[in-house]
Amino acid sequence: DSVVVKMIPDNRLPPRHLHAVRTGKTFAVVKWESPYDSPDQDMLYAVAVKDLVRKTDKIYKVKTQNSTVEYTIKKLEPGGKYHVIVQLGNMSKESSMKINTVPLSAPDALKIITENDHVLLFWKSLALKESNFNESRGYEIHMFDSLMNITVYLGNTTENFFKVSNLKIGHNYSFSVQARCLYGGQMCGEPATLLYDELGTGEDSSASKSGRSTDVAAIVVPVLFLLLVTLGIGFVVLYMRHRRLQNSFTAFANSHYSSRLGSAIFSSGDDLGEEDDEAPMITGFSDDVPMVIA
C-alpha cells in the first residue's frame, strides 16, 4: 500500500545557495534558489543592497515562481564593497553575501622624463577607455623607495602629468598612478606602476637600456650591411675571375685539339725544337717552275 503526502511549504525558510555569478564595474549578477522545491505560486523576494563604503541601502523586489532565480543588481560603483541580503517578502529568514565590484583600470602608457633636478610622469587619460571615469575625479600618485622600504603619497592631480622632485642619488623608486581613491581610500582604481633606477645619472633605467640598445643597433646594423656588401663584391670578383680562367683554358684546349686523335696534344719545347731541325728548309723558287695561284 502507498500513500501520497504533500508537505506544507514553510515560508519562513531562507533562500538557498545565494552566490555571485558575475561581477563587473557597475553591476553584479547574483543567483539563489527558492526555500523549497517547485513553488506552486509566485514568490516575492526582497533584495537589500547595502553600500559598505557610502553607508547607504537600496531594496529591490523580485517576483517569480521559478525555483532558481538570477537577478542583476545595477548602478553600482567601480571598486565598491556591498552587502547583499535576500529573503522572502514576509521578512522570513535571510541569506546574505558580500561582493566587491571591479575597480577602474590602470592608466595606460605611463612614461617618465628626466629633467635636471626632477622627473616628470606622463600617462594617457583614463577617460579614453573608462566611461565611468570623470577627469574631475583626478589621479593620485604614490612612490615606493626600495632602499628605505617605504611608500610615500606624493599627491593628486586632474592633469595627465605630475612633477616629482627631491629624488635621492643611488635610490631605486617605483611610481604608481591610479584613479583617485574615494571615501577614505576605500574606492580606488588599479595602479599603473613604473620602475625608476636613480644611479646618479638622472636617467630612467628602462629609458637608458632602450637608449643603449638603440645605439648598439645603430652601430651594428651598418657594419653588418657593409660586411654583406663586401662579401657580395668578393663573390662577384671571384666568379668573374673563374669565368675568365675557364674561357682562357677552353680556348687554349681547342687550339691544340686533334680531331684525328680525339684529344688535345700539348708539346714540350724540346719537341718543338726537334721538329724545326728536321723540317726541310724552304729555299727560293726556280724561275723555270711555274707558280700557280689558286
Image (spheres, rainbow, N blue to C red):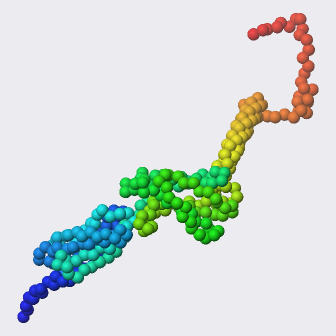
Q: Nearer the viewer, residue 267 or 44?
A: 44
Which quarter of the figure has residue 119? bottom right
Rendered position, 39 above or below 109: below
Q: Nearer the viewer, residue 2 or 18?
A: 18
Residue in the image at 49% along x and 55% along y:
157
Rendered position, 266 above or below 184: above
Residue in the image at 63% along x and 69% along y:
148
Residue in the image at 25% along x and 68% along y:
71
Q: Nearer the viewer, residue 49 or 238?
A: 49
Rendered position, 288 above or below 283: above
Task: Mark yes or no: residue 262 visible.
Answer: no
Task: Mark yes or no: residue 169 visible.
Answer: yes
- Counting from the top left corner in percent of width and height, residue 212 is at 67, 52
Q: Nearer the viewer, residue 170 or 209?
A: 170
- Counting from the top left corner in percent of width and height, residue 41 is at 11, 75
- Counting from the top left corner in percent of width and height, residue 225 is at 67, 43
Rendered position, 84 above or below 240: below
Left or right: 78 as drawn, with respect to 212: left
For the C terminus, which image quadrant? top right
Left or right: 269 as drawn, with respect to 22: right
For the N terminus, which image quadrant? bottom left
Which quarter of the figure has residue 5? bottom left
- Counting from the top left corner in percent of width and height, residue 74 is at 29, 63
Left or right: 23 as drawn, with respect to 217: left
Residue in the image at 42% along x and 51% along y:
128
